[in-house]
Amino acid sequence: MKTLRSFAVIGLIAGALVSCNKNNSSKPNTSSTDEAADLVTASISTNTEGGALNSFSDVTLSSETKVNIDSLCGTVWTDSVNRSIPAVPGVANNYSYKANYSYALNCTNGVYNHSATINSAYSGSFNNASLSSTFAGSADFTVSGLGRTYPAYIINGEYKRSGSFQSKADTSYHGTQSVDIVFTNLTLTKPLEVIKAGGSASFTISGNMPSKGGAFNYTGNIVFNGNENATLTVNGTVYLINLATGQKTKK
């Protein structure tokens, strides 16, 4: 499953670059919101290695396990994740991903309130026949609803991801991109962490493709509809996205 997730994000970003080439050969970044929608979708879909929702999943599961052992007020833990597919001669696809987490249990009037504040930093890279990329980012958020008696996790916080990319087919397609997403009341039901209806996010995405139109900047929002679906709006253009597959449809 993790392997499929990592290759999904490769396909999404590669698809965005191909879409750029088809839409406008001189200034693809300024003529369409499709590329921005692809990059934001890749950052939140559950089939994306290192994406926001998988980062939340890593942390909530780990927090739940540790809270069941020790829920003393102010307890601090650290944890890490490290996944990779090494480069193999003759095989185009490989990736690496690692993240470090710090958890602090929150208290109200000196009593543990079943929430934790999490800070994380992550980095990675991938390479396939079409594209190579490196990326790094951070997430700072609070998760509430920790403990067996709570039916869902509620997440509030910020996720950032930035990096560079280089097309293998067209060396002029290279540049940088940065995504910043702020989540509000994202609800994940236990035990499978299914996204419920409700919850939202706002985002900015920016970057630069020096040979293909220069700098770009987009803003928008996301409404989580439940059943692994969400509505994504980029600069006024609306898309329906499937968070499980990373697919989008312009509304």
Image (spheres, grey):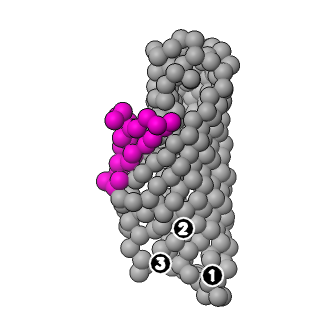
* Three-letter code, disc 3: Gly
Q: Between residues 91 and 168, which one lies in front from this camera angle?
A: 168
Q: CA distance from mark 1 to mark 2?
A: 13 Å
Give the residue number, with chain letter if any, for mark 2.
Answer: 143
Please provide percent x and percent y for residue 137: 65, 46
Q: Which residues are magenta?
A: 225-251
Q: Are marks 1 and 2 in contact (CB under 8 Å)?
A: no
Residue type marked 1: Cys
Rendered residue at 55%/62% (across/down): 156
Q: Position of residue 75 (x, y in %)?
A: 66, 78
Q: Is disc 3 placed on a helix, strand or loop? A: loop
Residue 146 visible in the shown view: yes
What is the three-letter code of the residue carrying label 2? Val
Local SS, label 1: strand
Q: Nearer the viewer, residue 129 or 17?
A: 17
Residue 107 has which mark? 1
Looking at marks 1 and 3 on the same chain, the residue that comes earlier in the sequence is marked by 1
In this rendering, the answer to whether 188 lies above or below 170 is below
